[in-house]
C-alpha cells in the first residue's frame, strides 16, 4: 500500500445505559450480548472510552460506527421503545461528541410505532447528525417487508441515509422446529452460528419481492455477514425470480439498493465471492466488535479481528489500492455524503 488505509468499521456494537436499564425493566434475557455480566463481551459492549479505543487501535480500525447490540429497542414494549430509542440516541450522540474523530453512530429506531420510527430517524439525522440507522429485521411478528415500515423507508429515502440491518433470533416456532432437541448447540445454531443469517436473508428477499424497493427505488440497505446467505444462492433464486413479477432483474436490486460488509468474518473466500457479485464499489467494512475480538474457538482463524487482523485482512486482499480504499472508507463516505445536513442550532 502506498499510503496507510483509513478503515471505517460500520458494525461496531455497544450497549448504552438507557437500553441496558430498559432490558432490566422488561425482564430481557440476562445474556452477555445484551450487556449483562462480567465476561469480556458484556464489559466491552458497555465500554465506550479508552479501552474501546485501544482495542480499535489493536484491530487497526480508525473509525467505528456504533450501533446497539441486537435487537436494539425492537423487542421492548411499544410504550417504552419510543422513549428508550430517543434516550439511547442522545447517549450515542454524547459518545460520538467525546471522540468525533473516532466514532460515528447509527440511530436506534422504535419500529413498533411507524410514525415515531420515521420521526426518530429524522431527528437523529437532522438534529444529531447520524449517518443512518440500524434495524433488526422483525418487530414482533412483523417482518421487514411489512407495510407498517413504509413510513420509515420513505423517510430514509427522503433523508438519503442508509439502513443497516442486523439479524436477531428467529421466531420461536422456527427455533422449536429446527434448533430444538439437539442439546446446548441448539441455541447458537439458531443464532449467530447460522440461523440468524437465514432469517434476515429471507427478509431481504421478501423486501425485494414485496416491492419495497420498487416503491422506494433509492432506499439503500447495508447487509452484514457477507450478505446474510442470499448472495451465495443468488443464481438459484434468480432462476425462479420470474414468479415474483419483479420490475428489475433480481441481481439489480442487490447492485443498486444493497451494500455488503463482512462483519468481522475475515474469510478470503467470502470476500472474493462478494466482490464478484457486488463489485468492490458496493462493499463496506466492519469488524462486529466485540463479538470477534480476541476469540478463536476451535482453531478457526476467520472470526478474530484482534492483533491487527482486521487491518491485515483488508490490506492483504486481492484488490488494487483504489479498490481497497473504496472498501476501507471511500464507499462509506460516498454513501453518507448524500445525507440531509444537520440543523445548525
Image (tube, helix red, strand yellow):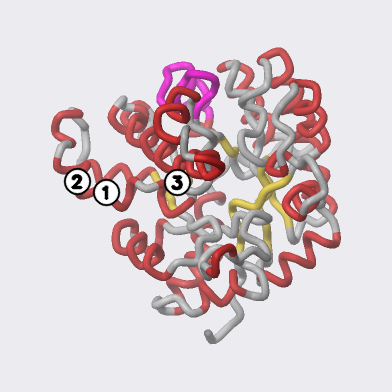
Residue placed at 19% from the left, 43% from the top?
238
Magenta-colored span: 138-155
Going by the image, does 172 lie left or right of 203? right
**Residue on which the image places disc 1:** 233
Residue placed at 75% from the left, 28% from the top?
23
**Residue on which the image places disc 2:** 236
In magenta segment, residue 28 = no
- Name which quarter of the figure residue 249 lies in: top left
How far across and down, in percent of the image, does residue 29 sit?
Answer: 70, 31
How far across and down, in percent of the image, does residue 28 sit?
Answer: 71, 27
**Residue on which the image places disc 3:** 194
Q: Is residue 163 above or below residue 80?
A: below
Specify the label residue 97 is tagged with: none
Residue placed at 28% from the left, 29% from the top?
209
Q: Is residue 212 above or below residue 316?
A: above
Going by the image, does 300 lie left or right of 83? left
Q: Give the farthest residue toward the bottom.
A: 2
10 Å neighbourhood of mark 3: few (<14), some, or many (≥20)?
few
Q: Are marks 2 and 1 in contact (CB under 8 Å)?
A: yes
Q: Are marks 3 and 2 in contact (CB under 8 Å)?
A: no
Amino acid at each position: 500500500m502506498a499510503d496507510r488505509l483509513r478503515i471505517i468499521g460500520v458494525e461496531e456494537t455497544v450497549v448504552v445505559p438507557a437500553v441496558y436499564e430498559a432490558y432490566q425493566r422488561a425482564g430481557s434475557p440476562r445474556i452477555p450480548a445484551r450487556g449483562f455480566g462480567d465476561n469480556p463481551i458484556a464489559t466491552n459492549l458497555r465500554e465506550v472510552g479508552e479501552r474501546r479505543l485501544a482495542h480499535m487501535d489493536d484491530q487497526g480500525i480508525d473509525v467505528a460506527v456504533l450501533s446497539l447490540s441486537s435487537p436494539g429497542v425492537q423487542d421492548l414494549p411499544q410504550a417504552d421503545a419510543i422513549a428508550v430509542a430517543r434516550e439511547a440516541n442522545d447517549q450515542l450522540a454524547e459518545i460520538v461528541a467525546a471522540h468525533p474523530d473516532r466514532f460515528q453512530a447509527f440511530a436506534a429506531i422504535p419500529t413498533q410505532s411507524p410514525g415515531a420510527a420515521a420521526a426518530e430517524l429524522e431527528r437523529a439525522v437532522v438534529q444529531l447528525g447520524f449517518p443512518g440507522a440500524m434495524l433488526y429485521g422483525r418487530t414482533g411478528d412483523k417482518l421487514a417487508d411489512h407495510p407498517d415500515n413504509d413510513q420509515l423507508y420513505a423517510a430514509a429515502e427522503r433523508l438519503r441515509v442508509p439502513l443497516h440491518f442486523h439479524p436477531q433470533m428467529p421466531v420461536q416456532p422456527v427455533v422449536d422446529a429446527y434448533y430444538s432437541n439437539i442439546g446446548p448447540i441448539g441455541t447458537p445454531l439458531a443464532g449467530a452460528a447460522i440461523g440468524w443469517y437465514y432469517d434476515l436473508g429471507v427478509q431481504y428477499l421478501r423486501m425485494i419481492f414485496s416491492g419495497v424497493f420498487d416503491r422506494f427505488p433509492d432506499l439503500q440497505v447495508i447487509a452484514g455477514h457477507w450478505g446474510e446467505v442470499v448472495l451465495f444462492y443468488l443464481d438459484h433464486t434468480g432462476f425462479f425470480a420470474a414468479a415474483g413479477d419483479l420490475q428489475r432483474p433480481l441481481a439489480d436490486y442487490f447492485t443498486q439498493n444493497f451494500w455488503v460488509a463482512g462483519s468481522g468474518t475475515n474469510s478470503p473466500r467470502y470476500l472474493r465471492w462478494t466482490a464478484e457479485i457486488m463489485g468492490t464499489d458496493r462493499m463496506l467494512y466492519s469488524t462486529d466488535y466485540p463479538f470477534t475480538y480476541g476469540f478463536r474457538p476451535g482453531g478457526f482463524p476467520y472470526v478474530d479481528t484482534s492483533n491487527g487482523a482486521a487491518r491485515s485482512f483488508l490490506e492483504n486482499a486481492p484488490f488494487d489500492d483504489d479498490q481497497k480504499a473504496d472498501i476501507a472508507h471511500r464507499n462509506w463516505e460516498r454513501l453518507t455524503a448524500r445525507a440531509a445536513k444537520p440543523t445548525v442550532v
